[in-house]
């Protein structure tokens, strides 16, 4: 059997499969006419929607590709992408999608010796690498050939991923030696090879098909739509094992998303080569301007920055630390307050539960921006004026300009907290073998914590302590009164307003998470705790909350990320967070796109870090795995 005979059999096999599919549909339709009418209407609607969607995005995508690869520099097209760049960007998007469908990269690093299992992944990477020298050699002399090549490559990649029979292709020579024994296997391989051969043929001989050249977009729209509907019908029959079904569903998703993916990639490519020089300059992603001195001043800690001296990168780092401080403290406070309010809502005391319910309903339904504004204005009017000299035993001064505490050496503070953290780690490791809740065990735990706290406080107080020094350079002019620079530690009113606002707002949602998680527990757990004589506090700490954590952690993860993202509203209270600083930089420099990208990456990195930490903790408390 030669390759031509195999191709004929493959086409016949494909036609027979389509006929079998139609037979299955007609057989079921004869038994259930209502299902037939409903399915037909859904099929027509799906056909129209997919076709319209493909038409919309493929028209835009192919238009961008034609502008960026026509080798003509003019006012509407200042420069083209080289063939290598087109292959790198468009082919890279196809390869990434193909590898995600195969889902073999993770296993490849865990089991590198079984490389034969990952032949599909190696095949995709090999084709991508081979495309760089081969595409220029093909010598596309029609613009439509370039357009056909990249879109056709995506459709072919989706088809190959759907079939998932790359391993059998390499065994085809052995199969052809015994065609009678391997007939079905040869046909299956042929169904995979045929689209690849057709893709190569049309890419190099497209000029022989003027009907396709005349309306390339419509051809691809029909192709994607028909294949998508056929695959969906095949998947709906559930004739394969779950692993194959998942891969086919992923391939179907990639095929349908191909027009949109190409639109996104080509749109970004066009923006970087936009004929409008102003727009192109805006999209010039360079951060050289961040090395220049920053002209405005902000309040920061622990990094001090000086305007017109320190560069913008240092200001960005200082503002980032400001955002991190607000986020971490708000997460701690909102968790504590949320647990208290959530548990209070379940109290049998009507006054306690009613007050907790009122708190939740008020702050959960109030916009955070409004809440921050109200807190900021109230702090500004209720705190005493600075000249009132309000203080607590001369150690803490508080006014509408800020709160000044005694300042401790940062190194001693770090050492003190490290001691407390080491004790916490010690108990975490020791409690893995079981928590000792006996009277002696509780006494031992309490003693160690007291000793650790005493040692930490001793280290902190052993360093230099800077008390706030209230000075009056001109007694007759209160406006000249101030706290001497370098003395004490200042907590600004803006920082306090952010902490209070984020805590009150998020704690209302945390309270509902706690209440819902506790109520989802079987009542028998609480009854069992009561029967063995546990006090309400012991029931809550040892029975209820540990089990409720399993459903609380994923929801708390989202709320903690919201705290990080909601801190971007700091400009309402004039707090110098990373959003506020970058926003002012935009007004000063005008580099909107690079700064927005920097801002996006900053918040994305923070969210991913919070999510990663919470997922690790969730993995510990969740025993059920699927």
Image (cartoon, grey):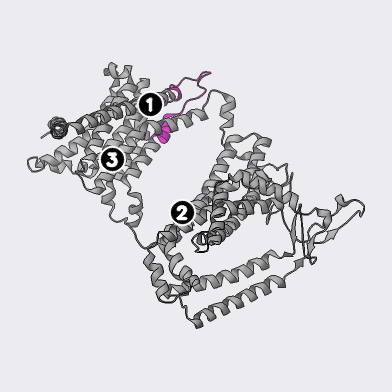
The residues bearing labels 2 and 3 have C-alpha atoms spaced at a distance of 35 Å
Left/right placement of residue 30 relative to residue 220 reads: left
Label 2: few (<14), some (14–19) or many (≥20) C-alpha neighbours in 10 Å: some
The span from disc 3 to disc 1 (Cα, nearest Å) is 22 Å
Question: Which residue is the site of mark 2?
Answer: 555
Q: Earlier in the sequence, mark 3 or mark 1?
A: 1
- Residue 217 image position (x, y, % from top left): 34, 22
Name the spot of residue 92 as percent of width and height, x first: 40, 38
Which residues lie in the magenta part? 65-90
Element on which disc 1 rests: helix
Q: Which residue is mark 1?
A: 58
| Location of the N terminus (image quadrant) | top left
At mark 3, the secondary structure is helix
The 10 Å Cα crowd at callout 1, few under 14, some 14 to 19, many 20 or more, is: many
Closer to the camera, 10 or 587?
Answer: 587
Quadrant of the image occupied by residue 66: top left
Q: Residue furthest left?
A: 180
> Residue sitting at 87 percent across and 52 percent down?
478
Q: Residue 266's x, y, as percent?
A: 44, 30
Residue under label 3: 161
Residue at 9% across / 40% down in the picture?
179
Q: Work out how far the residue at label 2 is from the one at label 1, CA to CA, in angstroms.
A: 39 Å
Q: Is residue 76 magenta?
A: yes
Vertical side of 49 occupied by 209: above or below: above
């Amino acid at each position: 059997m030669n390759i031509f005979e195999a191709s004929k059999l493959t086409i016949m096999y494909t036609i027979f499969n389509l006929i079998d599919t139609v037979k299955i549909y007609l057989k079921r339709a004869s038994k259930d006419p209502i299902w037939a009418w409903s399915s037909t209407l859904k099929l027509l609607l799906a056909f129209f929607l997919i076709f319209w969607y493909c038409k919309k995005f493929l028209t835009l995508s192919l238009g961008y590709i034609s502008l960026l690869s026509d080798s003509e520099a003019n006012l509407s097209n200042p420069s083209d992408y080289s063939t290598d760049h087109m292959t790198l960007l468009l082919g890279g998007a196809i390869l990434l999608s193909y590898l995600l469908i195969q889902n073999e990269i993770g296993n490849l690093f865990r089991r590198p010796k079984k490389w034969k299992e990952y032949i599909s992944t190696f095949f995709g990477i090999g084709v991508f690498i081979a495309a760089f020298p081969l595409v220029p050699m093909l010598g596309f002399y029609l613009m439509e050939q370039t357009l056909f090549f990249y879109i056709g490559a995506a459709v072919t990649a989706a088809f190959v991923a759907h079939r998932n029979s790359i391993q059998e292709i390499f065994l085809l020579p052995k199969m052809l030696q015994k065609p009678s024994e391997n007939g079905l296997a040869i046909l299956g391989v042929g169904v995979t090879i045929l689209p690849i051969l057709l893709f190569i043929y049309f890419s190099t001989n497209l000029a022989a098909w003027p009907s396709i050249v005349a309306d390339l977009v419509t051809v691809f729209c029909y192709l994607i739509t028909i294949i998508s509907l056929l695959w969906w019908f095949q998947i709906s029959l559930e004739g394969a094992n779950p692993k194959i079904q998942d891969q086919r569903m992923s391939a179907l998703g990639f095929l349908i998303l191909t027009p949109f993916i190409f639109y996104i990639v080509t749109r970004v490519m066009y923006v970087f080569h936009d004929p409008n020089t102003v727009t192109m300059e805006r999209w010039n992603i360079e951060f050289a301007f961040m090395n220049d001195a920053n002209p405005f001043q902000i309040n920061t800690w622990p990094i001090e920055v000086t305007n017109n001296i320190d560069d913008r990168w240092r200001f960005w780092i200082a503002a980032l630390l400001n955002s991190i401080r607000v986020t971490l403290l708000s997460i701690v406070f909102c968790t504590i307050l949320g647990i208290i309010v959530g548990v209070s809502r379940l109290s049998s005391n009507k006054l306690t539960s009613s007050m907790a319910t009122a708190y939740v309903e008020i702050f959960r339904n109030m916009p955070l921006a409004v809440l921050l504004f109200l807190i900021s204005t109230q702090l500004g009017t209720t705190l005493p004026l600075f000249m009132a000299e309000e203080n607590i035993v001369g150690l803490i001064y508080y006014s509408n300009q800020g709160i000044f505490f005694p300042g401790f050496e940062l190194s001693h503070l770090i050492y003190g907290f490290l001691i407390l953290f080491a004790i916490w780690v010690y108990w975490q490791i020791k409690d893995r073998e079981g928590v000792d809740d006996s009277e002696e065990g509780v006494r031992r735990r309490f003693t160690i914590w007291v000793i650790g706290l005493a040692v930490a406080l001793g280290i902190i107080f052993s360093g230099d302590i800077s008390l706030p020094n209230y000075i009056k350079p001109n007694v007759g002019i209160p406006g000249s009164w101030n706290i001497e620079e370098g003395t004490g530690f200042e907590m600004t009113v803006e920082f306090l307003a952010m902490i209070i606002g984020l805590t009150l707002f998020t704690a209302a949602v945390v309270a509902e998470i706690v209440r819902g998680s506790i109520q989802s527990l079987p009542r028998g757990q609480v009854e069992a705790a009561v029967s063995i004589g546990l006090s309400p506090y012991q029931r809550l700490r040892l029975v209820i909350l540990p089990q409720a954590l399993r459903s609380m952690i994923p929801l708390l993860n989202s709320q903690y990320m919201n705290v990080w993202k909601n801190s971007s509203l700091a400009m309402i209270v004039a707090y110098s967070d990373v959003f506020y600083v970058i926003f002012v930089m935009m007004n000063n420099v005008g580099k909107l796109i690079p700064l927005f990208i920097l801002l996006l990456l900053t918040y994305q990195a923070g969210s991913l870090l919070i999510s990663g930490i919470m997922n690790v903790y969730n993995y510990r408390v969740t025993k059920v795995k699927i």
